[in-house]
Structure formats: structure tokens, C-alpha cells
Image (spheres, rainbow, N blue to C red):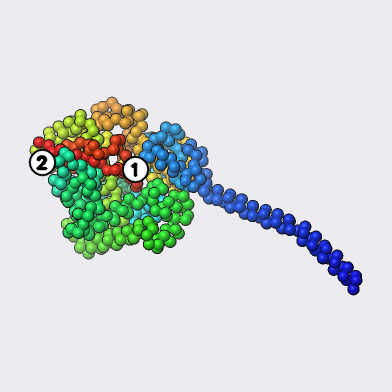
Amino acid sequence: MDLVNEILQELKKEGLTLIRNRTPMVSATTSMLLALSLLSGAVLGYLFFYAPYWGVRRLPGPIPFPLLGNLPLLAKYGPDLFSVLANQYGPIFRFHMGRQPLVIVADAELCKEVGIKKFKDIPNRSIPSPISASPLHQKGLFFTRDQIWSTMRNTIVSVYQPSHLAKLVPTMQAFIESATPNIPSNEEEDIIFSDFSLKLATDVIGQAAFGVDFGLSSKPQSGGDSMNDSRHQGKNNSEAHDFMKKHIYSTTMLKMDLSGSFSIILGLLVPILQEPFRQILKRIPGTMDWKVDRTNRDLSNRLDKIVVKKMKEKDQGSKDFLSLILRARESEAVMKSVFTPDYISAVTYEHLLAGSATTSFTLSSTVYLVAGHPEVEKKLLEEIDGFGPHDQMPTADDLQFKFPYLDQVVKEAMRFYTVSPLVARETSKQVEIGGYTLPKGTWVWLALGVLAKDPKNFPEPDKFKPERFDPNCEEEKQRHPYANIPFGIGPRACIGQKFSIQEIKLSLIHLYRRYVFRHSPNMEKPLELEFSIVLNFKHGVKLRAIKRA
Ligand code: HEM
């Protein structure tokens, strides 16, 4: 028994020693495991965040912050940022939008390489975070890809034949005429010209695209007036007005910086989390994602109804874009498989989106710039007055050939304020641009806004000089042919270019036959701009209209 006790005692002692000795061993192993898993987590996190960086690491560019990338620079420099970076890093450089690297191309010859010479390797657009959270905006021509895009584009191009555009002149003129009497010509009263031009451009494209009169521009117009003005509610067109309010909300929520909805911000920082979070947040009343989702669903329903109604009507005489697409769709089986009702809704809605903000911005910036340059105004008025009696409506041909100075003024205004300063593209396979090998899936963005301010092609770029576009002037002759491309480049260039130029010229002729404009003392100097889906005026363009004798 004693022996047993002795052995037990011995074992107990040994055991205790073992336990005493093992505690530090166990904790060391646990700590090591913990440290290893933290380290591998950090390495995986690092690889996850920097994987997109790896493919473009050889390009020069500013050092990205973790998560935010180079977005803080956007906040610091605003729309001028890419010119600043091009000066520092050259014609092709890297910029990190959150985690996503962009290859920015800021040179006319390289833009030609991306947009034309190597188009087959870079045929699609990258889909930025705000759009990937918005199914409504994805099925239009802008973001469709490859074969679907080319079938859609070929059909839509046929709608933009010059003969069809010429027929639209009287429709455009009718809207412009009914809008102008509402401009207050009291020299003491401000007109928020950017609101006026947005309503006008939306009405014109609403009619041309859907055959729907939104009735926005023919309503009373005065300083402080806005789309949400309660005086305009409850009138006969409240349906259309509500539709437009939703359209404006849906569009302005597509922010490219860190001021969008939570899911959009996540899309910029951690794309993989964007869709799951959007799915959750859109179910939580009151969140911005919930509001955007409701608005987009409502817009889609309304658009679908318009499409279904038009499909039933089968009005052979209608000249609006939607009716023409529907007729083209009837003629070929392949068209029916591409132009399903949801794509038709999206592409029609896209016209409203692409055609209103851009055209209205251009109209406003032209009038703003002319108001600040009396010598340009004088020459322009002489040309417009010299065309003929003020009630003589110009034809499409007149607009193209009989107003050469107006043409130069519009080109220069579009150069001065480039409404789409960046154009998004994405490589479909590995491709070499500007001496750098870019892997498949690289986002390549063309910096049209930087080209437009490049002193190589535009001496004294910060001066508003329409004469630089005079075909006989040396500057114009020597300029690179792709230095001024506000409508983009190559097979993917803007489809609405001729439509919008026709509308802008017609509007300007009509306006300057009746008024001249002066800057309001209530407007900031210089004009402040902000990035949303396209460039926009931060506080609107405030002018005073003076009736001409
Ligand atoms: C001043 C007015 C306008 C400007 C400055 C403008 C500018 C642009 C730019 C820069 C692009 C990208 C081109 C590229 O990737 O190379 C584009 C594409 C597009 N624009 Fe416009 N745009 C204007 C008016 C319009 C109008 C009125 C419409 C419709 C009626 C329209 C419809 C489109 C469409 C559908 C695309 C996508 C084309 C595609 O990917 O195939 N735009 N626009």
C-alpha cells in the first residue's frame, strides 16, 4: 500500500510538474497559431485589396491610400484633378478609385490607339460602382457588351439617319418656342438658366425618345424655380412631372465619389460586399439604398407601361425613337431576342438620361461663356441676324452649314467645359497601350477633359476663343485630329451627337434672336462645378435676360 501511495505521490508530483511546465508551451502554441492566422488574414486581405493593383503596378501614378485609393485627391482638386496628375505623371498613369485602379489616358494619339486602332481588344465599358448597383441603368447601349451591344447599336444608328434628324427640327423648334416666352426679361430678376435648359432638353428628348410631352419647359419660369417647385405640382401633367422627379433623383444619386448611397460607397471600397449589402439595405426603410431602389423600381414600371402601350398601339406614323425601335424589332427575328421589353425600356430611358443632362449643360455653359465675352456675343448676333427674318426657321442643312461662327462658339464652349471629362472602357484581353502591357479586365479611361485643356493643342487653354476652331486658322490646321473629342471616339462614340448639336444650335439661334444674357451678381466667380455622372454646376448658372429691341 505504501508502495502504491508512494507511486501515486510520485505521479502526482510528475503530473503537476508536467502541467506546470506545459502551460507556457500551450499558450506559446496558441499565440503562434493566432499570430499565424492574423498574418495570413493580413496577407490575404493585402492580396485581395492589391490584386487589381498588381497588373498595373508598372504605370506611374500617385500612391494609393488603403481602401480609399486616390479618392481623397478628387476631394482636394475637384474636376481639375486629372490635368494636375497628367502634368505630374505624363500621358498615361494610374489612379485608384477606392480599390479599383484606373488607367487614365490623357493624350490624343493614345486615345486614338484605345478608341480606334485597338478597339477590338477594348470594345466595352467598365461598369463603375454606382451603375452596378442600378440594374435600370445597365441594359442600355452604354453598358451592354460585345455582340448584344453591336446588334443594338446597329439598329439604333439607323434611327439617327440625317433624314430622320431633319424631320425632328420642327418638333424641337416647337418646344423651344413655347419655352422662351417664359424667360423673365426683367433686368433685376435672375433666371436659373441651367434649370431652364434642363427642362427644355428633357422635354425635347422626352418627345423624341418616347413621344411623351413632359410639359416642363412651357411652365412659368423665374428665379428660384426648380423641378420640385410646388407651384408646378397637381397640374395636368403631374404624372410626367412625378416621373421626371424620380428620373432626376435616380440619376443624381449615381455619385462617383464618396457621397452616394452606402452600397455605392462599399462598391468603391470593397466591391465584393456591394451587392449583398444592397440587397439588405434596400429592405430597410429610410436608407438611401431603399429610396433609390423604390425610385428605380417605380421608374422601370412606368417605362415598361409606356413600352407595352406603344407595342399595342403599333402606330406606323409615330417618329419617336421608341416607335422606330419597335418597328425595327418587328422586321428581324434576331432583333426580338436582343430587344426584349426590359432592354427596350432601358435603352429608351438611357436616351432621356444621356440626352438631357449633357445637352442642357452644354447649352448653359455656352450662354454663360458668351455672356462674359461681349466681342463673341457681337459676332454671334451678327451671324444670327444675318441669316434672315427672325421668324424664319432654319432647316437641318442650314444649321449645319449656314452658321459657321455659331459652330465655333459651341465647339469652344464644349472644349472649355467638357461635360463628360472621362470616358470609361475596359480591356477584353491583354493589350499594349503606350508601351505598357495591360492585362485583360483593366479599366482604361480616356481623359477627354485633360485633352481639351492641353496647351500643345490649345494655346492659352483657359481663354474662351471660338476663333481657334475657324477651319482657316493655323491653330485648327495644326491640331491633332483627336484633341477635341467631347462626344468620344471610334465605334463607341456618342450616338446622339448630331441630335444634340442640332438642338443646341436651334435653341441658341432662337434665344439670341430675342435676348442677350448677363451674369447675375448673385452668381459665384469662377463658376463652381461638381462631378456626378457627368459634370454639373454646383450652384446653377444664374443669368439676367435682356430683351433685344
Ligand atoms: C452635348 C451633348 C452630349 C455629349 C457631350 C455626349 C457625350 C458622350 C460621350 C463622351 C459618350 C462616350 C463616348 C465614348 O465612349 O467614346 C457618349 C455616349 C453615348 N451617348 Fe452621348 N452625349 C451627348 C448627348 C447625347 C444624346 C442627346 C443622346 C441620345 C439621344 C446620347 C446618347 C448616348 C449613348 C446611347 C451613348 C453610348 C454609346 C455606345 O456605347 O455605343 N448622348 N456620349
Spot occupied by residue 59 in the image (x, y as percentages of width and height): 49, 38
Picture quadrant of residue 188? top left
Dot 1 surroundings within 10 Å: few (below 14), some, or many (20 or more)?
Answer: few
Q: Judge whether 193 appears above or below 40 on screen.
A: above
Q: Nearer the viewer, residue 486 or 440?
A: 486
Q: Quadrant of the C terminus?
A: top left
Residue at x 22%, y 38% (from the top left corner): 520
Spot occupied by residue 297 in the image (x, y as percentages of width and height): 33, 61
Spot occupied by residue 6 in the image (x, y as percentages of width and height): 88, 68
Q: Is residue 32 left or right of residue 489?
A: right
Question: Viewer-nearest of labels 2 and 1?
Answer: 1
Residue at x 36%, y 29% (from the top left corner): 456
Picture quadrant of residue 112? top left
Label 2 SS? loop
**Residue identified by numbered label 2:** 392
**Do the CB atoms of the residues marked 2 and 1 lie less than 8 Å apart?**
no
Q: Judge whether 86 appears above or below 34 on screen.
A: above
Q: Is ligand 1 less than 8 Å from the beta carbon at label 2?
A: no
Query: How far apart in space, not on screen, are marks 2 and 1 (Cα)?
Result: 38 Å
Residue type indicated by callout 2:
Gln
**Residue identified by numbered label 1:** 530
Residue that sits furthest to the bottom in the current view = 1
Q: Is residue 532 left or right of residue 326?
A: right
Q: Nearer the viewer, residue 325 or 13?
A: 13
Residue type indicated by callout 1:
Glu
Q: Quadrant of the N terminus?
A: bottom right
Residue 86 - label: none
Whichever of callouts 2 and 1 sits on the residue coming sooner in the sequence is: 2
Q: Is residue 484 left or right of residue 431?
A: left
